Amino acid sequence: MFRHIKILKNFFSLTTAEVINRAAALIYLPYIARVFGPDGFGKVNFAESVAGYFMLAANFGFDVIGMREVAKFKEKKNAFAHILFIELVTSCISFLALCAFVYFIPKPLEIKMLIVLYGLTLITFAFTIDWFFIGLEWMGAVAVVSMVRQFFYIGLILLIIRAPGHLWRLPMSFIAADIVAIVIFFCLFFARVKKQDFKIEWRSVRYFSREALPLGVSNFLNSSRDKVGPVVLGFLRSISEVGFFSVGYKLLCVANIIPLTLNRAIFPNMAHALKNKTHEEARAYIRKIFEITSIIAFPAAFLIFYNADFFVRFIFGPSFQDGIYITRIIIWSTALLMFNKLYYYYMVAIGAQKRLVACCLAGLAVNIGLCLIFVKVWGGRGAALAFLVSELVIGVVYYFASGARTAPGREFVKAFICFSPSLLFCFFADGRAHPLIITSLAAVLYAAIVFKAYDIKSLFKGEDARAGGYDVGSL
């Protein structure tokens, strides 16, 4: 049975927070882009991407494993202490490795210092316990804390960053915001969780480490693809091109707010269903999310593609106009990211971490190989194209490796057919009005068709594994 009310509540909490956070980001992103310029913006994004690799090594999937264990076995009392201990150890080791790496890379001292400052977030990350609250489905607390953290971060940026030379203040603001969130999380933890076993047992440490090892490798490989473009551009091209590429990637993240949040909200329910080996119920969840995601994917991608010129110039400034074509390429990976993340969570839920490693390795290998070839020829556009192709490859690999026997083909085609009249409207109306007006009217037309073609209530309800009229067991 679908726990649709709980899912909707969790989804609403996380989505509300994400939408507000992303909207708030539209305050500070234009600000720092204009203050730092393409060169400075490229420096901070390059430093953040390099430090991000060491963050992946520190995380290594322990938070997801902890989330899964808490969701499956809410009566367990020792997961919290062990995950916290392991993440603290791995974060310290990763930070030392980052410092050693920075010492040897041939980059200016300013960039090296930015990388080290972003590396300090490794320590704050170890104490971030949102995974525990998500596992218990306390999404409201996670949503509120994330919003408090975001607005504190924005306030610091607007207060202390005033000139191009203030690059180092951006990572320091990030760390300060992390500390605020950590303090709130721990206050909530000690107020709401009365009994916890804080004794560290090496047997449990080995268990969580063994469980997280394949997931950590896959998480490192999967998330590394997001950082390949900026890092390769930073070493093979110019720092400014990193800034142009980051423009497209930031807008891609905005387009993925709702579907990726929905995947995150549904993960505890999927893990709980698979605890009792109810794979058909889990596949029904997947089928339902595919349907919702397909409805969102086309308009989200097309909105940014069609208005790329306006969005880039308005949000980041005219000096970032080289990021327009990069945005128009990378934005089409929106739907692929949505579907791939759902396969990822399903494979984590069923404990198929080793297969996940192979999937992520394939995607990363394709991205790196194409990046090294395309970046030399087309720069940032080549990096965007490499990212798009790698998402397509990993989607195919995910489908066969997951064993979910569920693909988004039927839902994807239906959503595309529903969106076709809006595409035709934009084609014939192009140049007759402002692009935002045209896409707004197209969105109204699409919404009317969706409400006619879909039973909206059934998208969020379902009482058996044959959700939405589909026999998930036969797919």
Image (cartoon, rainbow, N blue to C red):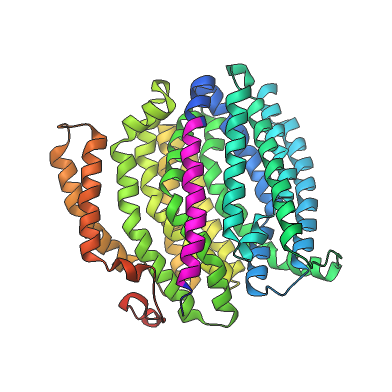
Question: Which residue occupies the extreme left position in the image?
Answer: 428
Q: Residue 324: x percent and y percent?
A: 36, 31
Q: Which residues are magenta?
A: 4-27
Residue drawn where x is 66% and y is 26% of the image: 169
Foreground of the two, 103 or 323: 323
Please say whether residue 9 is one of the residues in the magenta stretch.
yes
Residue 373 seen in the current view: no
Q: Residue 402: x percent and y percent?
A: 49, 70
Residue drawn where x is 56% and y is 77% of the image: 274
Q: Tell me the quarter of the image containing the C terminus.
A: bottom left
Please say whether residue 178 is one of the residues in the magenta stretch.
no
Q: Main secondary structure of the magenta part?
A: helix
Q: Residue 409: x percent and y percent?
A: 32, 66
Residue 201 seen in the current view: yes
**In terms of image quadrants, where is residue 326?**
top left
Foreground of the two, 233 or 206: 206
**In terms of image quadrants, where is residue 382?**
top left
Above or below 459: residue 24: above
Foreground of the two, 464 or 204: 464
Name the side, left or right, on which 274 lies relative to 456. right
Name the side, left or right, on which 251 lies relative to 177. left
Residue drawn where x is 59% and y is 31% of the image: 155
Name the side, left or right, on which 115 lies relative to 442. right
Residue drawn where x is 35% and y is 81% of the image: 471
Above or below 311: residue 258: below
Q: Residue 245: x percent and y percent?
A: 46, 34
